[in-house]
Image (spheres, rainbow, N blue to C red):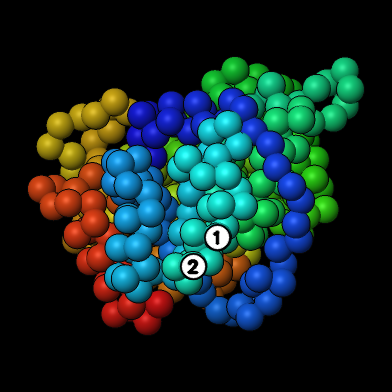
Amino acid sequence: MTLSRRKFLVKGSLSLAGTMLLSNQLFAAHTAGSAMVGIQLYSVRDEMKADPLGTLKQLAAMGYKNVEHANYVDRKFYGYSATEFRKVLDDLGLKMPSGHTVMADKHWDNAAKDFSDSWKQTVEDAAVCGQKYVISPWLDENLRKNYDDLLGFLDIFNKSGELCQKSGMKFGYHNHDFEFKYSLNGKKIYDIILEHTDPKLVIQQMDIGNMYGAGGRALDILKKHPGRFESMHVKDEIKSAAKGEMDSEYESTILGKGILPVKHIVDLFKKSGGTTEFIIEQESYQGKTPLECSKEDLKIMKSWGY
């Protein structure tokens, strides 16, 4: 996820609302050992902005069955209300097991010891759309400068898990690179997050590409924390020709074309990581169109048996 995507998502968490609906039954057909492959719609962000319905139709025609949103603004997903977007997905034979909406400190009222209406509405609308996970893909800088402040917000993560659980969902967190660059009290931020969140309430969605430039290695983390990663962003990386907004030396590429042992990682996480959700995300395209890359990425995942 690039800096521009973070801005995109933070803006998308400003004003939210909805109606609550249990979603567990929608996923009853998937056993603990099964794998669901989907696409993060940020991979086709410009196409979704210009023509969300047409883009979803193309993804469904490619063979995608699951999508993950990265746009929720003013109670709308890509311009549709929760009920409308659910119908769009249903009509195309698509499900949306998860979605990205940033949870910030403004979403918790410390005096009232309760979540803001906007965050409650985020959860409600996620349930209407049939989500299984409500995933926050960012941690504001002010929440990761002080160890005690971080622990306090991780407790709110657990409370968000309790809130999501009432609607048959789980709360989740999606990593970037800073969790592996920086430490507090002698521990990497990612280790602190894993140690102080309840796995029954807060799932970890591991982005195997974001961490690479900061020294994070998915297989090393799996050894330390087996069974903690219900969801994964499947991504490959190559050396970047030009540093972007994140000043990263790497950028994403078509699966199997980069330097990560993606198939090996995916196979091991399915075996011992507790991972059942494999979500393709590609943010850089090396001269191809995003839709061309999305089609090729899915073909490769299928060739790997997913």
| The C terminus sits in image quarter | bottom left
Q: For this view, does 187 lie left or right of residue 3? A: right
Label 1 sits on a secondary structure element that is helix
User: Which quadrant of the figure has residue 254?
Assistant: bottom left
> Hey, what amino acid is under mark 2?
Asp
Residue 234 place in picture, x, y as percent? 39, 59
Q: Is residue 201 above or below residue 120?
A: below
Residue under circle 1? Answer: 87
Residue 119 place in picture, x, y as percent? 71, 34
The foreground one among 21 and 10 is: 21
Image disc number at residue 91: 2
Q: Do the residues labelled 2 and 1 touch (CB within 8 Å)?
A: yes
Alpha-carbon span between mark 2 and mark 1: 6 Å
> Hey, what amino acid is under mark 1?
Lys
Residue sitting at x 68%, y 23%: 105
Q: For this view, does 71 lie left or right of residue 165? A: left
Residue sitting at x 72%, y 72%: 25
Q: Is residue 40 above or below residue 46?
A: below
Label 2: few (<14), some (14–19) or many (≥20) C-alpha neighbours in 10 Å: few
User: Which quadrant of the figure has residue 62?
Assistant: bottom left
Residue sitting at x 24%, y 56%: 291
